[in-house]
Image: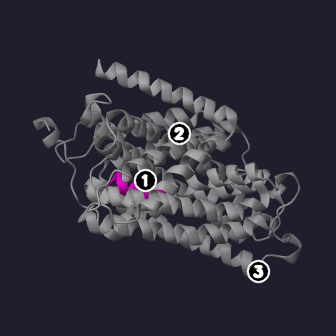
Amino acid sequence: MSSNQQRAQLLRELGPFGAVLMGLGSILGTGVFVSVGLVVIQAGGWVLPATLAAAFLALCNALSSAQLAANHPTSGGTYAYGTRYLGPWPGFMAGWLFLLAKSFSAATAALGFAGYLAVVFEIEHPAFQTAVAVTVVVLVTALVVSGLKRSNFGNTLIVGFSVLVLACFAGYGFFFAPESAVSSWSIEGEEASLPVFLQATALMFVAYTGYGRIATLGEEVADPRRNIPRAILWTLAFSALLYGAIAWNLATVPREWLAANPAAPLESVAMRWESPLLAGLIALGAATAMIGVLLNLVLGLSRVLFAMGREGDMPRVFGQVTASRSPRAAILGMGAIVLAMVFIGNVGTTWSFSAFTVLGYYAVTNASALKLTSSERLYPRLFSWLGLVGCLGLAFWVEVRIWVMGLSLIGLGALWRLAMRR
């Protein structure tokens, strides 16, 4: 390690509770307020078994991530693990896929925030949503630049309010929704097929992957071997319970309710339940949750970009830290990239592309975990094998145009690394 790399280290100032909240802040936003509705629109009743299948696959990946992070607690997540256990090229591809996947996820969060505000103010013009999304990306990037402690405090408030709002939605759906607005759960017609189920599982899987933010912040977690695995598993367990409750409610309402505004499905359902108070609460909760997701994504993305810059796989300027040991250049760089993604302007497209790329990312995670020695391993190898096969198998069940574009961008990444190394 060069003297420059020794100086470019981050502070371990994140405790176990803060780590769990960072994971939840990444999950309880776009995943629950937007993606569950998107899956119901495309797959109907398959959302429930897909939620369970995605949770199991996420568990396999979480166990691989947890033991890798415990043994190698540094910034960069699977970029660092892949480089150490598989070699420079697999590591680079993991980092490249993460930057692609989560940049699109961050854009989805910003667009989801704008979508909920558009419903509140009854503004249908696309330019409004784009302008709002751009504004919130700029503001969140500025907050992340101000430091991890302030970011963590803001995230704590956001997560607490999000959980309260989701509990209100689930409780109302179970106990107070009008009988005329609720149908029985079923899988029938053209949607009752294995391909539809697999596509739904792929889309739901990406909704769970916020727990990986804990691993990408590994260099800033105190007592990482003890705190990182526990934080990842608690984050996944809590989010799975909430997803199940929300999925059940959305699976028993007419699909056209969700299709009317795919960027704000929970609020649309609350309005159909004739509960404007609940709809307003959901709109506020969704908006704050989207900001929380965006905040956590910019945090995680900037740490991966920082790690790649430090190793020379990205411009060296991104691998530098300020006097307060903040990766400011990497944060600002990721803010600019997310801004560019926002202009795609389509929630469904950004989410599908994120699903494809993040499945590839976690395939590298599981392959890296299989290289752990017996003394390093915390969980049976079977989970890593299941995670690897599941990720590779599901990656190609998204739309054909998405994985063709994804493979093209992977090829572009290979050319980028060759250019950087030259």
Mark 1 and mark 3: Cα distance apart in space: 34 Å
Q: Residues within 10 Å of mark 1 (few under 14, many from 20)?
A: many
> What residue is disc 2 on?
134
Residue 411 visible in the current orientation: yes
The quadrant in which residue 64 appears is bottom left
| Circles 2 and 3 in contact, beta carbons < 8 Å | no
Magenta region = 209-217
Labels 1 and 3 touching (C-beta < 8 A): no
**In the rendered image, which quarter contains the C terminus?**
top left
In front: 420, or 316? 420
Say whether residue 422 is magenta.
no
What separation in Å lies between label 2 and label 1 (alpha carbons)? Answer: 17 Å
Helix, strand or loop at disc 2? Answer: helix
Q: Earlier in the sequence, mark 2 or mark 3?
A: 2
Q: How is the image coloured?
A: one colour
Q: Amino acid at mark 3?
A: Phe
First in sequence, mark 2 or 1: give its number: 2
Mark 3 closeness class: few <14, some 14–19, many ≥20 residues within 10 Å: few
Give the residue at x 56% y 73%.
164
Local secondary structure at mark 1: helix
Which residue appears farthest toward the bottom when viewing the image? 175
Residue type pointed to by label 1: Asn
Residue to which mark 3 is pinned: 176
Do callouts 2 and 1 mark residues in contact (Cβ within 8 Å)?
Answer: no
Task: Report the amino acid beneath label 2.
Answer: Val
Q: Separation of disc 2 and disc 3 at Cα?
A: 37 Å
Q: Is residue 105 left or right of residue 258?
A: left
Residue 282 at x, y percent in the picture = 64, 65
Q: Mark 1 or 3 closer to N-term?
A: 3
